[in-house]
Image (cartoon, grey):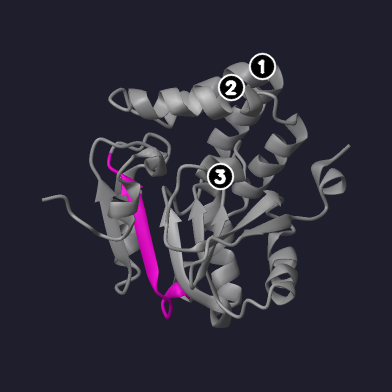
Amino acid sequence: MGLQMRYPISEFKLFNRGKQDTIVLIPGWATDYRIFERIDLDFNYLMPTKFSPFSFERNLLTTLKKNDLDRVSVLGWSLGGFTASDFAAKHPDKINEVVLISVREKYERENIEKIRSSLNENKKACLYKFYNNCFLRNEKGALFLFKRNLLAGYLKADLDLLLEGLDYLSDSQLRLQELKGLKVKFIHGEGDKIAPMEEALKLKENLPQAKFISIGKTGHMPFFRPDFKKIFYGVKDE
C-alpha cells in the first residue's frame, strides 16, 4: 500500500507551554516529532504527530484555524526545511519567522536513488548509517542520547514512509526568492556531512535579510547540543 494512501493527512498536536507565540516544528527524513524532544524554546509547540509532506500545507491551515492561530513561526530541520519554506512562501501572512536548520537548496536525485536502493536492500543498515552520519566524532554525548531514546523506534520505521520522504526530496527545492519579505534564520553545523555548510552559506547570500548562525564542531542535528537554546537566541557564553 502506498504511503499517500496509508497516511493521507498530517495530524498536529498543540503543546501549550504558557508562551506568547507558537512555533511549528517540522522533522526531517527518517524521524518524527520526537526528534525535537530536547528543544526548549520560548514558544508553544505545534508538532505533526503524523507527518506527510504532501498533505502538510492543507492540514496545517486547518489546524491553525481550529486553534485560532493567526500567525506562527515555522522551524524546519533538513527535509522539514523544504516543507517550512514552501508553506511560508505560499502563506506569508501567517508567518512570524522561518527557521531553517541543516538545509540544502536541493538533493541530487542520483544520491536519493542510491539511498532508495540501500533502503530496499537492508533498511536497518541504511538507517543506522544515516543516523551516525548526523553526528560528528566529538558529539558522542549527543549520539548516545539519540541512540538511547530514539534509535530503536526509528529503525522500525515503515519502509513506505521512508520511500515517500525520498519521493518528496527528489522534487524539492528551497523557494528562497519568495522568502525575501520574511524574517528568516539559518542554523547550521560547520561539520554537517549531509548538508554541507558551504551550500547553506550560498543560500544566505540570496537572502540579505536572513540571519546565519554557524555552530562549530557540530553535525546535522545541532538541536541535540545542550546549549542550543542560547545558540538559537544568539546568546554568547562569557
> Mark 3 is on which residue type?
Gly
Residue under label 1: 122
> Mark 2 is on which residue type?
Cys
> Mark 1 is on which residue type?
Asn
69 on left or right of 130: right
Percent x, y of residue 143: 42, 26
Percent x, y of residue 104: 44, 50
Of badges 1 and 3, the one in the foreground is: 3
Percent x, y of residue 49: 69, 49
177 on left or right of 237: right
Name the one closer to the observer, 19 or 149. Answer: 19
Residue at mark 1 to residue at mark 3: CA–CA distance: 20 Å
Which region of the structure is painted magenta?
179-190
Q: SS at mark 3?
A: loop
State the mark number for residue 229: none
Picture residue at 56% right of the left edge, 77% below the top: 71
The tag earlier along the polypeptide, 3 or 2, is: 3
Name the one closer to the observer, 60 or 226. Answer: 226
Residue under label 2: 126
Residue under label 3: 28
Residue 174 visible within the image: no
Quarter occupied by the N terminus: top right
Q: SS at mark 2?
A: helix
Picture residue at 40% right of the left edge, 39% below the top: 224
Can you tell which quarter of the image residue 235 is in? bottom left
Residue at mark 3 to residue at mark 2: CA–CA distance: 16 Å
The tag earlier along the polypeptide, 1 or 3, is: 3
Q: SS at mark 1?
A: loop
Please report contact status of discs 2 and 1: CB closer than 8 Å, yes or no.
yes
Picture residue at 54% right of the left edge, 21% below the top: 128
